[in-house]
Image (cartoon, rainbow, N blue to C red):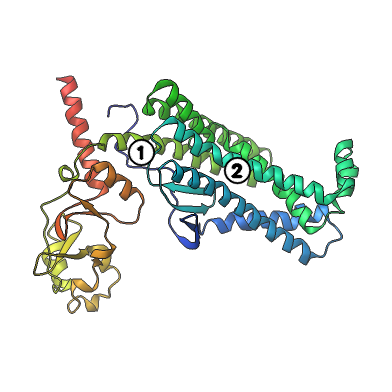
């Protein structure tokens, strides 16, 4: 794992905060909405309701304008969901399960349970998203032109802007919505095929480089560098836009560029970490020497006798038969009033065993990494049936990687 990048920064790109709500399921995939999506939804609906649609339909009642604007914004995010679902459907068909899709500030993320095992799989999973957006865009535009009839077709064919604007005023709400939705999806498809890793186009580029070199790490490194170059270009354009007077559009370009730069760098670092942990037995990484507590122990005694004197962060709670009942740490104590410390047993505040993620003794550290990067549970429990063998956290993985990196460096310089 020798590389000029820092491989021991355990990052994965891109991930959202996890705050939000579940919308439902489609094709076996959980659909989630991150609260940050409301920001971009309000901006799009506001732009349509205050500027775009009033310029097309000055005679429309404000209620009709805003109803069309809100419907258009909803349809836009439905098209993004379709884009991400297409990734999920192809990934499932290629043997890579997809657990969730999250819509958030910058669009959507289909969270794959693994990585493509071949350039072909990478290519197919990546390219289907932009193709889906393109199909939606072309179909919506064609439907809008069909609904609009001859006036819009004739005006567009003539290139007469005055006549085109006059034709726009004749559109009904459905044609208006579709005529905005179509081109915006075509633009989305074009943006996504730009080879800026980890955008879809960047993943297509990585698949081509992977096929050409036969080396996933080399392909990812070059795709990530192209992605960072694209991100810095966006940020430079954002600075120019700000000084040119376009404050909001400039800040938006800066924000997208910053996000893509971090995502490209973290994606490559995550690959290095994942490669470093492949085929490493989990029992060689986990912490097996652990202080364990009784479920009836009071919170006060737990803090005094276990948490404060020890560097151990998470403590297994075991029953008389040695069966794991849960985990307790200082994090759970934050939810309890100080007055209840003396009378409250740790069993009342622990994370119960059924909510913990378990790994078998023969699991690999790479599997633990995938579970931890989902961000729901840290640490993981390593067990043999009901018997606890140890715990493994992100810090444990980092410690193992750092120790072995130093050992490799010492061996090379000896």
Q: Is 383 situated left or right of 69 in this image?
A: left
Distance from disc 2 to disc 1, alpha carbons, whole Å, reads: 28 Å
Residue behind mark 1: 270
Q: Which residue occupies 54% across, 36% down?
A: 127
246 vs 345: above or below: above
Residue positioned most to the front? 93
Q: Residue at x 44, y 46 (%)?
A: 92
Residue at image location 10% in from the left, 64% down from the top:
322
Q: Position of residue 392 (x, y in %)?
A: 21, 50
Quarter in which the N terminus is drawn: top left
Q: Residue at x 45, y 43 (%)?
A: 93
Bin the neighbour count of mark 2 within 10 Å (Cα to Cα): few under 14, some 14-19, many 20 and up.
many
Image side of residue 334 versus residue 61, left or right: left
Observer-nearest of 149 and 397: 149
Image quadrant containing the C terminus: top left
**Mark 1 residue crowding within 10 angstroms, few (<14) / some (14–19) / many (20+):** many
Residue beneath disc 2: 132
Choose the circle earlier in sequence order: 2 or 1.
2
């Amino acid at each position: 794992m020798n590389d000029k990048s820092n491989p021991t920064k355990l990052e994965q790109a891109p991930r959202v905060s996890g705050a939000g709500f579940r919308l439902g399921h489609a094709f076996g995939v959980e659909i989630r909405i991150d609260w940050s999506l409301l920001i971009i939804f309000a901006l799009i609906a506001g732009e349509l309701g205050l500027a775009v649609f009033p310029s097309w339909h000055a005679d429309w009642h404000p209620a009709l304008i805003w109803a069309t604007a809100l419907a258009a914004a909803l349809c836009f995010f439905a098209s993004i969901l379709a884009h991400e679902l297409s990734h999920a459907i192809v990934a499932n068909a290629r043997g890579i399960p997809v657990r969730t899709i999250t819509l958030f500030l910058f669009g959507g993320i289909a969270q794959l349970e693994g990585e493509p095992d071949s350039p072909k799989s990478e290519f197919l999973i990546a390219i289907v998203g932009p193709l889906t957006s393109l199909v939606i865009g072309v179909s919506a535009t064609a439907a809008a032109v069909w609904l609009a009839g001859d006036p819009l077709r004739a005006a567009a064919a003539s290139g007469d802007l005055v006549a085109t604007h006059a034709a726009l005023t004749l559109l009904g709400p459905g044609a208006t919505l579709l005529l905005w939705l179509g081109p915006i999806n075509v633009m989305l498809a074009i943006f996504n095929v730009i080879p800026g890793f980890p955008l879809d186009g960047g993943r297509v580029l990585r698949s081509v480089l992977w096929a050409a070199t036969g080396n996933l790490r080399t392909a990812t490194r070059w795709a990530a560098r192209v992605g960072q170059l694209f991100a810095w270009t966006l940020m430079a354009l954002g600075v120019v836009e700000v000084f040119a007077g376009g404050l909001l559009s400039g800040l938006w370009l800066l924000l997208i560029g910053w996000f893509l730069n971090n995502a490209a760098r973290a994606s490559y670092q995550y690959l290095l970490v994942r490669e470093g942990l492949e085929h490493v037995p989990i029992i060689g990484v986990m912490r097996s020497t652990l202080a364990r507590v009784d479920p009836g122990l009071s919170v006060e005694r737990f803090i005094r006798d276990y948490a404060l004197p020890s560097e151990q962060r998470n403590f297994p709670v075991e029953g008389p038969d040695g069966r794991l009942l849960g985990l307790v740490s200082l994090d759970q104590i934050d939810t309890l009033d100080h007055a209840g410390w003396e009378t409250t047993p740790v069993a009342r505040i622990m994370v119960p065993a059924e909510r913990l993620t378990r790994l078998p003794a023969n699991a690999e550290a790479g599997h633990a990494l995938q579970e931890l990067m989902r961000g729901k549970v840290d640490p993981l429990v390593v067990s043999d049936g009901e018997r606890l063998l140890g715990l493994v956290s992100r810090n444990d993985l980092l410690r193992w990687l750092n120790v072995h990196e130093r050992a490799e460096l010492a061996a090379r310089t000896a």
